[in-house]
Image: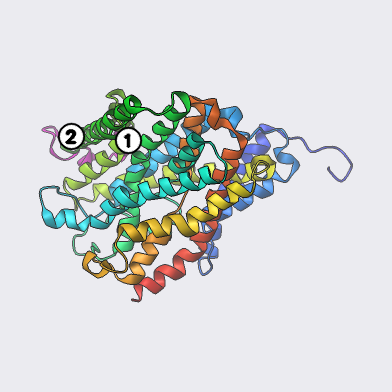
Amino acid sequence: MSPIGVPLPVTADWVYLVAGVSLLLAVVLPQVLSRYAVSAPMVLVAVGMVIGATPLADDVSVDPAAHLSLVEHVTELAVLVSLMGVGLALDRGLDLRSARSRQGWSATWRLLAIAMPLSIGGVALLGWAIGLAPAVALLLGAVLAPTDPVLASDVQVAGPQTDEHEVDETDEVRFTLTSEAGLNDGLAFPFVYLAVIAAAEGLGVGTALEWVGWYLVAKIVIGVVGGYLVGRALAWLAFRAPSRSLRTAETGDALLAVAALVTSYGVGEVCGGYGFLSVFVCAMTFRAQERTHDYHESLHQVVERLERLLVLFVLLVLGVALTRGLLEALDWRGVLLGLALIFGIRPLSALVAMGWPWSHGRRGMTGGEALATAFFGVRGVGSVFYLAYAAAEDDTFAADGLWSTVAFTIVVSVLVHEVLAKPVMMRVGDG
């Protein structure tokens, strides 16, 4: 109420004002408080919670189940932009013909092929054991499997280094976490589909074979091939087109990054593959061409700004939703699953995948680096997208309890990992 007793008007203008001030705080406060464990994601979630507790949010619906299509597409775009940024930022290339190059990605392959299935299985089994339906438990495992390529930026690579003398090839923790996050967003999709199939049809021999052949193998291959072809085509256009006016690397038009992510995603999806994989592979393929060209920095800057805007907006809305009833359906089972994943299932699965402590030295990581890599599996926007996607496919997954569990896990992950990222990385870096 205003001082004279007249209700304050809640209009779209107020929403724009609050959103603008909140985004400004997200940019400014982390710089001002850089000596402390404060980050833009933490600020935005906190500001969103404050807004949600005021009358400003009374007329704003933030129930994700009531806006599945909007939630799905906004988070989908945020993930796509993040994947393009990650693919452009990685300085370590991948040449499958080279044993040395494959070995440089060894920890990433292990996290994807071993740790991620173990994490999905661990969450699913725990969920089933505490009373969730098998399909719901499996979906939670798949939804919470992807790590976020944006949140906890202190443990991610900073961006493309185009000066070959400045490229740091030794930071195994940052490279492994970033490359894992770039790939597991697409590789979690088969397990989301498996949960949807299980809820709709049940699982039998026929559906299992179809899932393995199409959803687990064919769609991954199509996504990778589609992204590679688009990346090669756009790299030729940018660096080697016969006409200078077509060579965007010389004209400096950085909007090619946006065109690349939209085109590669479209090609991957139209051809029946996983578009998330197409976008990441496209970015990696493009970066592999003329790796030290300054154009990569320009592309990454455009993507990074768009990425920050989208992700911070999603986190702001998440914060508002937290104090507008998103956690009302949270029970002990959701709390147990979220905490178990963050503090037990993910770290243990990753350590098993990396062979710690028996063989970590032979895999290019110290014991401290292996522990840090295992612990920093940040959950974020991708989990919201997958849950919205599954809920749109089957009403079984639209339950408020699932939204509460995923939201709780994301918030705890952001808080814990953001607070610990800087001190842990400084300690690991010191040896």
Mark found first going from the N terminus, 2 or 1: 2
The answer to whether residue 145 is magenta is: no
- Left or right: residue 78 compared with residue 96: right
Picture layout, residue 389 above or below residue 165? above
The residues bearing labels 2 and 1 have C-alpha atoms spaced at a distance of: 15 Å
Which quadrant of the structure image shows residue 233? top left
Query: SS at mark 1?
Result: helix
**Which residue occupies 45% across, 55% down?**
345
Q: Give residue 290's position: percent from left, percent from top.
A: 16, 48
**Which residue occupies 28% across, 53% down?**
110
Q: How many marks?
A: 2
Instruction: Label the magenta part by its dominant secondary structure.
Output: helix
Query: SS at mark 2?
Result: helix
Residue holding disc 2:
237
Q: Which residues are magenta?
A: 238-261
Q: Is residue 412 visible in the rendered structure shown here? A: yes
Nearest the viewer among 391 and 288 is 391
Q: Give residue 104's position: percent from left, percent from top.
A: 20, 58
Binning the other alpha carbons within 10 Å of mark 2 as few (below 14), some (14 to 19) or many (20 upward) gives: some
Residue holding disc 1:
261
Q: Amino acid at mark 1?
A: Leu
Picture layout, residue 33 above or below residue 140? below
Quadrant of the image for the N terminus?
Answer: top right
**Which residue occupies 84% across, 43% down?**
2
Could you tell me if the residues under marks 2 and 1 are in contact, i.e. CB atoms within 8 Å? no
Q: Is residue 25 visible in the rendered structure shown here? A: no
**Which residue occupies 50% across, 26% down?**
392
Q: Residue furthest right?
A: 4
